[in-house]
Image (cartoon, rainbow, N blue to C red):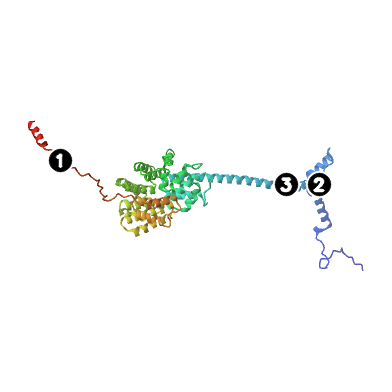
């Protein structure tokens, strides 16, 4: 019996005979797939061109498959360069856009800083020191020091000096601006820095620089702080009339300078001009009724009744310089009341309020001497905060140690020696002859 064997198939991976392939995996199917693979990418249009025209004048026609393969190779080799070009283009556009954004932000920051500087200059001229402190912090930024190349350096130096002298007496402020203070002898001399230097100085130092102040009048005639500095220097010199004119000009230009208004009231009180004192007290009560300066002036010059006004309930905290003036006035009143212990204690509190700064200590000494409280002035020179290294302080101590010239009481009468009168010897007959002569007449 003859057995007909079918076609053998390769075994599977497990050793069993392989299965018969499906119809789509026959020889005919494989041949069809190979033909399709050879003609892949060929279009009917390309085949028609080749059959119609045969070879061109420039040589044989490329096989469509070869042509498409060559173009695919060209595209494949050119793709990295296109990606690099696209990446460079994107990076360039991003850099240009970033530069434009940064330039716009920088320009906006400069414009905003200019606006802050203009507002600061306005508030400084008007004397609104609370706003000056706020805008100065914005203009200076988080830096603890000042930049010598800053275009607004002069404005910041003068603002720091004003806050130091009339607000908080902070030694850090003085240390921050001290390298930039200048006088007329400094080259280059800045008018703003000269005024700042005079503001942080004592009254005696301002008086010694009075010609320098007078020379600056044409430039700063509309500046209220300039006239305040001029008034204090003239007052120290003893020119009361010129000092009052400068005080009135400062009041006309800057009624919101509260510390100036209090000192002007005190100046008029020392001159016993009660009408002018009342005007300054009323001005403080009108422009800033809840301020420490208004309360202090009302209590010291107009009686304590103003402290019971409704504005006192919402009163703002007193700045350090106002506390200094308050405790100093109390000390002077206690000294006049013959209470030296309390006067010394109040004077110590006044000096502590301004952190023992030399300008305030020297001014307090001068005011005590002017008020003839020499005992309290002598006590002040023994304080720990007395500026012993200052030549001005040493001169004050020396002047205080000199005995005051006093007129002698009941000076002795000096009698000049007188000659004894000589006895006159009457000549006989002389009287009778005179009587006869009168009788004849």
How far is the residue under mark 3 from the one under mark 1?
155 Å
Residue 398: which disc? none
Q: Earlier in the sequence, mark 3 or mark 1?
A: 3
How far is the residue under mark 3 from the one under mark 2?
24 Å
Residue positioned most to the right? 1
Tell which tag, 2 or 1, sits nearer the viewer. 1
Residue 66: which disc? 2
Quadrant for the N terminus, please: bottom right
Quadrant for the C terminus, please: top left
Please rate how many residues cluster around mark 3, counting C-alpha atoms within 10 Å: few if below 14, some from 14 to 19, many from 20.
few
**Residue 276: image x %, image y %?**
32, 45
Closer-to-camera residue (54/147): 147
Tell which tag, 3 or 2, sits nearer the viewer. 3
Residue 81: which disc? 3
Q: Earlier in the sequence, mark 3 or mark 2?
A: 2
Dot 1: what SS? Answer: loop
């Amino acid at each position: 019996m003859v057995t007909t064997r079918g076609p053998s198939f390769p075994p599977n991976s497990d050793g069993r005979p392989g299965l018969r392939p499906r119809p789509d995996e026959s020889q005919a199917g494989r041949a069809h797939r190979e033909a399709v693979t050879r003609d892949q990418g060929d279009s009917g249009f390309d085949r028609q061109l080749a059959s119609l025209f045969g070879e061109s004048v420039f040589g044989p026609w490329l096989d469509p498959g070869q042509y498409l393969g060559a173009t695919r190779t060209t595209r494949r080799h050119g793709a990295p360069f296109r990606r690099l070009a696209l990446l460079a283009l994107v990076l360039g556009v991003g850099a240009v856009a970033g530069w434009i954004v940064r330039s716009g932000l920088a320009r906006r920051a400069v414009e905003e800083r200019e606006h802050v500087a203009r507002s600061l200059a306005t508030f400084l001229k008007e004397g609104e020191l609370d706003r000056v402190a706020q805008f100065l912090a914005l203009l200076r930024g988080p830096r603890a020091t000042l930049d010598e190349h800053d275009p607004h350096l002069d404005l910041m130096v003068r603002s720091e000096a004003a806050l130091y002298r009339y607000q908080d007496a902070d030694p850090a402020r003085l240390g921050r601006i001290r390298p930039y203070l200048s006088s007329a002898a400094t080259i280059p001399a800045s008018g703003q820095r000269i005024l700042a230097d005079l503001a942080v100085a004592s009254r005696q130092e301002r008086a010694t620089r009075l010609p320098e102040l007078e020379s600056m009048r044409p430039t700063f005639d509309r500046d209220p702080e300039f006239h305040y500095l001029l008034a204090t220097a003239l007052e120290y010199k003893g020119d009361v009339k010129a000092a009052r004119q400068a005080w009135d000009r400062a009041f006309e230009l800057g009624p919101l300078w509260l510390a100036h208004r209090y000192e002007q009231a005190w100046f008029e009180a020392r001159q016993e001009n009660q009408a002018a004192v009342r005007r300054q007290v009323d001005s403080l009560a009108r422009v800033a009724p809840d301020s420490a300066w208004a309360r202090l002036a009302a209590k010291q010059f107009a009686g304590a009744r103003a402290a019971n006004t409704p504005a006192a309930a919402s009163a703002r905290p007193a700045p350090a310089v106002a506390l200094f003036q308050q405790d100093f006035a109390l000390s002077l009143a206690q000294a006049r009341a013959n209470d030296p212990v309390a006067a010394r204690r109040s004077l110590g509190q006044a000096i502590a309020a301004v952190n023992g700064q030399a300008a305030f200590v020297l001014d307090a000494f001068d005011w005590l001497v002017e008020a003839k409280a020499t005992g309290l002035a002598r006590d002040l020179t023994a304080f720990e905060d007395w500026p012993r290294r200052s030549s001005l302080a040493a001169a004050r101590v020396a002047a205080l140690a000199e005995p005051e010239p006093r007129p002698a009481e009941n000076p002795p009468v000096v009698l000049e020696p007188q000659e004894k009168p000589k006895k006159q010897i009457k000549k006989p007959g002389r009287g009778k002859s005179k009587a006869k002569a009168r009788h004849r007449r």
